[in-house]
Each structure stands twice: as structure tokens, then as C-alpha cells.
Amino acid sequence: MAVQAPKGTKDVTPQESYKWQYVEAIARDVCRKYGINETRTPVFEHTELFLRGVGDTTDIVQKEMYTFDDKGGRSMTLKPEGTAGAVRMMIENKLFNEAQPTKMYYLSAPVFRYERPQAGRLREHHQFGIEIFGAPKASTEAELIAIALEMISRVGIKGLSVNINSIGCEKCRPVYNEKLREYFKGHIDELCTTCHTRLEKNPLRILDCKEEKCKEVAKGAPVILDCLCDECKEHFEQLKGYLTAMNIEFKVDPHIVRGLDYYTKTVFEIISNHIGSQGTVCGGGRYDNLVEQLGGPKMNGVGFGMGIERLLLVAESQGVEIPKNENIDVYVVTMGDNTEIAGFKLAYELRKKGLSVEFDNVGRSVKAQFKYAGKINAKYVAVIGEEELANGQAKIKNMENGEEQLVEFDKIADYLRGK
Ligand code: ATP
Ligand code: MG
């Protein structure tokens, strides 16, 4: 039997890559408008980066990382999210010394999580993400939400909701954690065993547990918004103000905590109401301590990650038609041995002039060449028979309306451009 792709991975075939390219072109254009440039960081990093960055009480670190020892005995991990690597890159390249803010995006960056594969939940997926450092104002979060929304809606997706919350800072969260502990202690028998550990180490994580019984208990838990310090409260109010200024509708959802430990203040999710539990297309928030935690200076940060596969899945479920690439301009048909090399050369010359051209590398009959040209939707066919060759011409046929015209070889490119 042929070897199959690993469970939880998804190929992008040449037939469907146009969808990815379409989405990527939109992402690049939106980022251009906000003056954000691309970064590319390694697919694997030292495991320690994620232990320190993502947080050792998160599901990602506890259950989902692809960790291995390399041949030199160093522990490496395939990126389980995009932010930690971006922060490492920022610190290592001393970007904090430049004029602030430091802005960057990554596009179709592979992310690996050992999850239970299902629709919209893969073991390797790809993210479009943005990270902005050195921008303390809540307008930053608001702009990121606007970017994500523009991106998703330009793809053609409808029915999105923006959910925001604040999970406080190192000043107010401990107070909240105590309240949570108190509350959950009263319901300890209703919690899963993992949540028993979470109760001591990081009770906030219980709010993100996927177990039904824990979700049920979490519904009655105290709400963080009631415990925010003045600074966090004000920041949250400002965020709402900026969103309102852009006429962006949002919902305050006090139950969002996100699956990563590094967030402070704002967290947000953009959800499609079309595909159930895998409907979260984009998630992000502020992380004002992460840079320092990873060995950099004190510097705040905000970011989001958007799953490309999820985005395409939502688009598909809504029947969105993503525009296909342009068809091939010209298919060169040759008739007989003598004309073959002339056709080959013509294809080469036309490509030099920028046209997209296909030539028969299969050895098909003339009839089959025409059939194939139709199949690939070539706009024109350039036919070279013995007679055309003798006159240094090709017969250019418009495949849409059947019009034919004899054109000299070196004028074909101009002729087609004129059309
Ligand atoms: P979820 O709640 O769906 O598990 P998450 O909170 O783990 O998402 P993030 O870590 O914030 O997600 O990742 C950002 C985005 O990446 C998600 O909103 C989603 O679009 C996508 N994503 C996350 N995990 C997966 C996965 N296993 N397969 C495909 N896409 C994913
Ligand atoms: Mg997850």
C-alpha cells in the first residue's frame, strides 16, 4: 500500500492552491495598508521557549507539543503557536532598539499541535498572525481586530462576531484567581481530574476546559470584569471606544480566557456562527509581560493568530466562490515532426515576453492537443503546421469565439497583448 499522509495533516493540491494564494494576497494587502512587514522564523525552536512562553499549565504544553531530541541531544519543539517565536526573534535581533512600535506579520506559518483531528482541527495547520510590540494603547487591539475583520470579510465570509474580554493584569488577576479558587473548591467533585491540578496552579485555566461537566460549573463562576483594577478597566473601556469609532460591532464575553498563559488585559476572538465548535477563525490579545519573561526588556505586545484552513473551511461552508487564477494564455499546437521544435521555441519566446504558455510534452496527436488546450481553458491556441512554418507564422485561434488569424512568430506576443 502507498504511504499515506500523517493523521491530522492536510495537503494543498495544485488544483486548490489558488484559494490559499487568494487569501494570502488579501492578508498582504491589508498589512501593507497598516505598514506591517513580514517576518519568517524557524519551524522549530528550543523547547524551553514554549515552556517559558506559552505556559506550562496550558493544554498546548501539557498535551499537544511535538517535542523531540535532535541528534545533538537538544530538546526541540515544532512551533505550537506563532507568538513565542516572534518574540524570540524580536529580542535576538534587538528590534526593541528601533523606533517603536515594532510590527510584523507571518503568513501561512505552519503550527503543530497533537490534537484529536476533526474538521477544522488539524495536527499541522497554518496561521496568518500579527504581533505588535511597544504599543500600549488600546487602539492597537482595535486596529488588530479591524485587520482581522477586513481580512475575513474580504474573503467573502459573513456572519462574524467579535467577542472581547479583559483578563486583567498581574495586579488584579491574583485577586480574581483567589475568588475562582474559592468558587471551584465548592464544586471540586464536579470537576475533571486535570482541573483539580489547575485549581492550585492556575484556576483561570478551568474556564477554558473542554470537558462538559467543567464547562457547566464554569458558567456560575465569578466574572473577571468585576475584579479588574482601574487601569485594566480603563483600557477595556478605551478599546470599546475605538471599536465603536469604527462602527465595529462587538460582544463582551466574560468567559473568553484563551488557551495561552501569556495574555494580559485584552483577549478577543472572531467567531463564525456557521461551523459549531471549530468556528473560531481568529484569536488574540495583549501580552504585556511576555517579552520580559522571555529575556527581553520590559515591552508590551499585542497579537492574533488566524487559521488559514479554518478560514477556508468557513468560506466553503458558506458557499463562498474564491476566484480562480487566470487561465493559460496560449497553448502551442504543432502538426508533424518538423514543426515540433519550432513550436517548442515559440513557447519559450512567448514566455520570455511574459505570457503563460503550454507546449505538448506528452507526445499527443494533433486532435488530442486541441482537446487538452480546451481542458485547461487556454485562451488562445497557436497552431504551427508545415505551411505556417514555411511562412514563419502561426495560426492564432481564439478559443472562445473560434476566430483565426495568421501572425508572424515575432509578432504573436504583441498581437495577443492587443487583444
Ligand atoms: P480553539 O479554541 O479552536 O482550539 P485556539 O484557542 O487553540 O483555538 P489559537 O491558539 O488562538 O487557537 O490559534 C489561533 C487560530 O488558529 C484559531 O482561531 C484557529 O483558527 C486556528 N487553529 C488553532 N488550532 C487549530 C487546529 N488544531 N487546526 C486548525 N486550526 C487551528
Ligand atoms: Mg486549541
Image (cartoon, grey):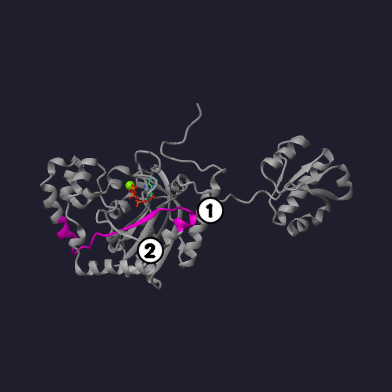
Sequence-first tag of 1 and 2: 1
Q: Secondary structure at mark 2?
A: loop
Image quarter of the C terminus: bottom right
Badge 2 density bin: few <14, some 14–19, many ≥20, Cα 10 Å: some
Magenta-drawn segment: 151-177
- From the image, tell me which residue sits under label 2: 248
- Mark 1 lies within 8 Å of ligand 1 (Cβ measured): no
- From the image, tell me which residue sits under label 1: 22
Q: Nearer the viewer, residue 271 or 349?
A: 271
Badge 1 density bin: few <14, some 14–19, many ≥20, Cα 10 Å: some
Q: CA distance from mark 1 to mark 2?
A: 25 Å
Q: Amino acid at mark 2?
A: Ile
Residue 393 lies, in percent from the top left, at 84, 50
Q: Are marks 1 and 2 in contact (CB under 8 Å)?
A: no
From the viewer's perspective, is residue 93 above or below residue 330? below
Task: Examine the structure image and report whether residue 158 is included in the region drawn in magenta.
Answer: yes
Name the mark on residue 295: none
Q: Which residue is the extreme one toward the bottom?
A: 99
Q: Secondary structure at mark 1?
A: helix
Q: Nearer the viewer, residue 343 or 43?
A: 343
Q: Is residue 418 left or right of residue 105?
A: right
Say whether residue 134 is visible.
no
Task: Examine the structure image and report whether residue 297 is included in the region drawn in magenta.
Answer: no
Residue 224 lies, in percent from the top left, at 20, 58
Q: Which residue is pictured at 51% across the width and 29% down the height? A: 2
Q: Amino acid at mark 1?
A: Tyr
Quadrant in which residue 416 is drawn: bottom right
Residue 78 lies, in percent from the top left, at 38, 47
**Viewer-side label of 1, 2:** 2
